[in-house]
Amino acid sequence: MKAALVQLTSGDDPAVNLAITAGFIAGAADRGATLICTPEVTNCVSQDRAHQRRVLHHQDDDPTLAALREQAAALGIWLSIGSLALKTDDPDGRFANRSFLIDPRGNIAAQYDKIHMFDVTVSETESYRESAGYRPGDRAVLAQADDLTLGLTVCYDLRFAYLYRTLAQAGAQVLLVPSAFSPVTGAAHWHTLLRARAIETGCYVLAAAQTGTHAATAGRPRETYGHTLAVAPWGEVIADAGTEMGVTLVDLDAGRVDQARGRVASLTHDRTFRGPL
């Protein structure tokens, strides 16, 4: 399977973002990609909750989801929408950070709500409290795309190795990690963590990312690290998109998953243990 990773600099206007995203998807399909992946919060990067309440939608009437489902059907592709920021009916008004896999007929084959919330203090001047605006999911998700089994995750999930091990032991061959990584943590940890998840599981890791400075009509602009990455099951980086928007293509071969796991079968070597006391 030929996969394409789309790197975006989404702003806080979903309509503008949709036009750019759809253009990259069409170009990737023209180049032969049959699985196309977009980053986290493809539809809207914003740190202003009031603005989000004005421009976001519920899943059933979200224009970005509807348009991308139609495009996937028209192109006959599998489309991983890394995630969309969506309204929910939660009493506290929090949003969902929800990933979708769309099949070549435009149907939602799977959806996944980001489990781990990015509540961190990177420095005295940079902190995030994702859980203040988004409610966490509580279910791991596998999905089938032709002959490949995909494990769906989002961004900060990357730091929780047990999720990826669970997905791999349940059958995942490709782990999706759409992201909007901070520049500081990205420079320090992005490549290392993605390679580690591939090495630990013997999976391909595909991480479509947001990049650069994101246009904001309300609130403070956000910056993200970029470096959309594809990692092979043995841990070697097979593509790094740098920091510009665009499309990166890679070939996926399930045989390489089998080969890596045959060489180091650590997924079958779990042992129970006691302690620490």
Image (spheres, helix red, strand yellow):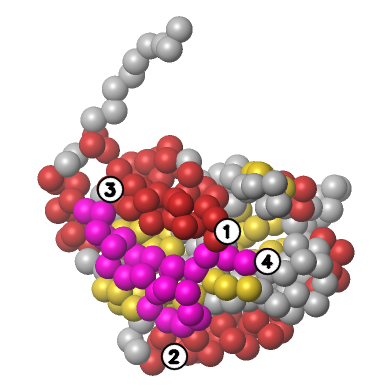
Q: CA distance from mark 2 to mark 4?
A: 27 Å
Q: Earlier in the sequence, mark 3 or mark 4?
A: 3
Q: Amino acid at mark 4?
A: Arg
Tell me where the magenta segment starts and ends, as one range.
222-248
Magenta residue check for 235: yes
CA distance for labels 4 and 1: 9 Å
Residue at image position (55%, 50%) is 156
Task: Give, as a three-letter code, the residue at label 1.
Answer: Ser
Left/right placement of residue 97 relative to residue 164 reads right
Query: Mark 2 belongs to which amino acid?
Result: Gly
Name the residue rendered at 61%, 53% in the picture.
Answer: 113
Q: Quadrant of the N terminus?
A: bottom left
Which numbered disc, 2 or 4, marks the residue that appears first in the sequence?
A: 2
Using the numbered discs, state the Cα–Cα distance from disc 3 to disc 4 in whole angstroms: 31 Å
Mark nearer the viewer, 3 or 4: 4
Q: Which residue is mark 2?
A: 27
Tell whether 82 sits left or right of 125.
left
